[in-house]
Amino acid sequence: MNSAKTQGTLEYDLIDVEVHQKSIRNIANEMAITLMRTSGSPVVTDAKDFSTCILDANGEQLAFSGFVSFHVSTALLGVQAVMRRVDPANLRPGDAFACNDPHTSGAVHQGDVGIVMPFFFEDKLVAWGYVNEHVLDIGGSAISGFALGAVDSFSESLAFPGTRIARDGAIDPEWEGFIANNVRMAGTVLNDIRSMIAANNAGQRRLEATLAEIGLDRFTTLNEESKRLSEIGLRAIITSMPDGTYDSSDWVEFDARGIEELHEIHCRLIVEDDEITLQFRGGPQTDSFVNGVEPSVLGQSWTTILAQLAYDIPINAGIWRPVHFDLGPKGSIVNAVAPAPVTMSHIQTGMRVNKLLIDVFSQACSFSKNPVIGARVAGQPAQNQTYFTAFGVDRRTGNPTVSFSMSVGMSSGGAGQSVGDGMEIYAAQAMAGCDMPDVEAEEMSQPGMILWRRVEPDTGGAGVFRGGNGVNTCLAILHCDRMNAGAYTNSAYVPPRGVAGGFAGSAGTWKLLRDTNILDLLETGIYPTEESLQGHSIPGPTQSASLTLNRGDVYTVIHGGGGGAGDPLLRETHRVSADVSDGYVSAGVAHDVYGVELAENGSVDEVGTMALRESIREARIGGKVKRPILSNAPTFAPLGIVNERWACNMCGEDLGASTGNWRTQAVTKEQEISGRFAELKSNVRKRVQFEEVVLRENSCPGCASSLVVDVTLDGHPLVQSSRPGVFERFPAAI
């Protein structure tokens, strides 16, 4: 324990500090309200894809309105970029700086534009305001900020490295003309920039009022105490996680150029006393928009830390102090440098970072003796974002329009956890405060008609607590004759994993139907359904940079679901029966995966279920089950170490020396993943080039409990086991 940082006497009462901390957070929230009320973009007003932050004069965070949690890093890095570029003597009230370059000014991708403004009190710089939102367009080849066809950052979009675009609160006319001449939706984009300036101005006014009331000295002292309390809170959580080394690997997908690329990335978590180190490694950066860069890797790391570990700790500079990041050598896919393209850095490599961290944190938490920390074990959410972005002319107005339908693209399932089932329609872990836009709002602002939106059964991974299901959404292009578009998903070949023996969730997919009869159906008053729609399905890759959408084309997305938590054979039978009744799980999956016999009326045949589950256990290990499951078995911590030996916590079976990998003693069944997923009534795309993606189901040889279900590549070695009490770092980056 770092006593110098966590002990001492508060100069103010705890309630005093808490009231102050919330007052600063309320200022950040008022900035957010100002943005929502002045923006004309549905991405802000409906989807709430934005964040606001207040930092002190030194660039340390004081408060964050967490609509999109990865902006924790962009706020810090964006302000730091401005502080590096600008002489403090040249700052004055009303200055506004644009930051949207992941390589120089802290953005997670170029479509997220941050506006940084200095806050003054009595002619002294006292703080910084940061407002960030996804703008509808940022020029270049990146329609709505995603440049699928770009091979370098120069061909992606406009990139502002912390550029002063406003003086005295007004956009410089030269910059206004330049931006208007280089983006597709000039009026909307410029209005949003003004809205971000207005939001910062609201923060400036409210902060001035606060300082006039309490004074700068008290303001500064209370800020420092608030930071220290957040630091203490996070250190206490880390202390409850067992020291040791925890590893995870995943793959970033890209197939837009005819090659089914999978780029392997690694995360190693080192827990040591009250601090953690997160080490990331990956292969060389690539010439596609999937590259990870510092803002996205750090930002998505904070997304998972805040969601899984520190959800009740105020966000400020204190949370950064016990957490250390090592992104490895520059020029890798997790630490890309210019001119690597990065317009989907946050969704491609970034959301794989979320999955890596959920895995390593769940490993560490499962060994914790603190029941609160032990309860933070979770599978991986789908993190499946499947969008199309398109540009054309709206027949209704004759004006150019950009289509970026967030409700179609974001609706994937959440992870099963040790405390309950995953959420249906979870979206992405970073979208902590986002909303799904209403159908009516999207149809008014976009050139399409949403034909249906419904939960897709069996997409959530099976478990004691199953993963949340994804959503099936269908959109028809009606109000543009032709649109140039890109379409992409980030999780088609490698699905989200479960935890503690839970099964993987479904991957995502999209399809395009051309030459349809939808216009005829609508003309005759027949509502289009899957049964009545006719057309030609166009096969192709999961990512397409040169898509053309024509009037009457129909685009359908089936989102993936989250990974399950715990062995599915231990799920309570009444939950399975209810899921079948509610349409979340099919009767076939209830029987084949959960081992539940249902009568024709939907009731559970308990005797038949016991026999069926026993037969499934025997099939897992290829013989009779030798050990019963203990009545007090820790369902979400099936592995433990007893007397320096790995053991199955479900039955006590010995699994070898703790210095080795327990998987060598488990019964492992490996199968190409699309074949196994077909049996599970789930969806994943088969990889036909290079190594196949495989599912390895590891079962206890004693009780046949599902211990861990690994997703990896054919021919790869056994997945590395946890190493509690061992500190094994990657070599230092050069």
Image (cartoon, rainbow, N blue to C red):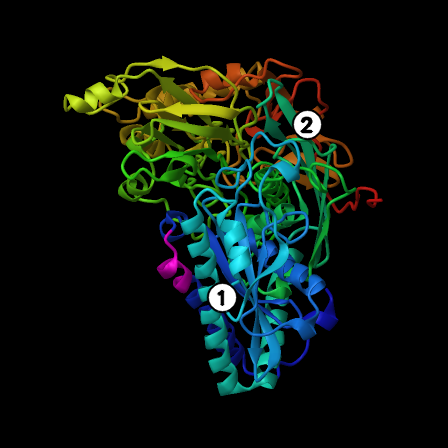
Give the labeled residue for mark 2. Answer: 663
In reply to whether residue 236 is colored magenta, the answer given is no
Residue that appears at 20% across and 20% down? 521
User: Would residue 297 be visible to someone looking at this image?
Assistant: yes
Magenta stretch: dominant SS? helix
Whichever of callouts 2 and 1 sits on the residue coming sooner in the sequence is 1
| Viewer-proximal residue among 630 and 323 | 323
Q: Residues within 10 Å of mark 2 (few under 14, many from 20)?
A: many
In what element is the residue under mark 2? Answer: helix
Q: Position of residue 347 (x, y in %)?
A: 55, 39
- For residue 170, which numbered disc appears in the image? 1
Q: Position of residue 71 (x, y in %)?
A: 55, 54
- Asked whether the residues under the numbered discs 2 and 1 touch, taking CB atoms below 8 Å apart as contact, a structural biologist would say no
Residue 119 located left or right of residue 280: left
| In this picture, residue 152 sits left or right of residue 35 | right
Count of numbered circles in the view: 2
Place residue 279 in its image quadrant: top right
Kind of residue at disc 2: Arg
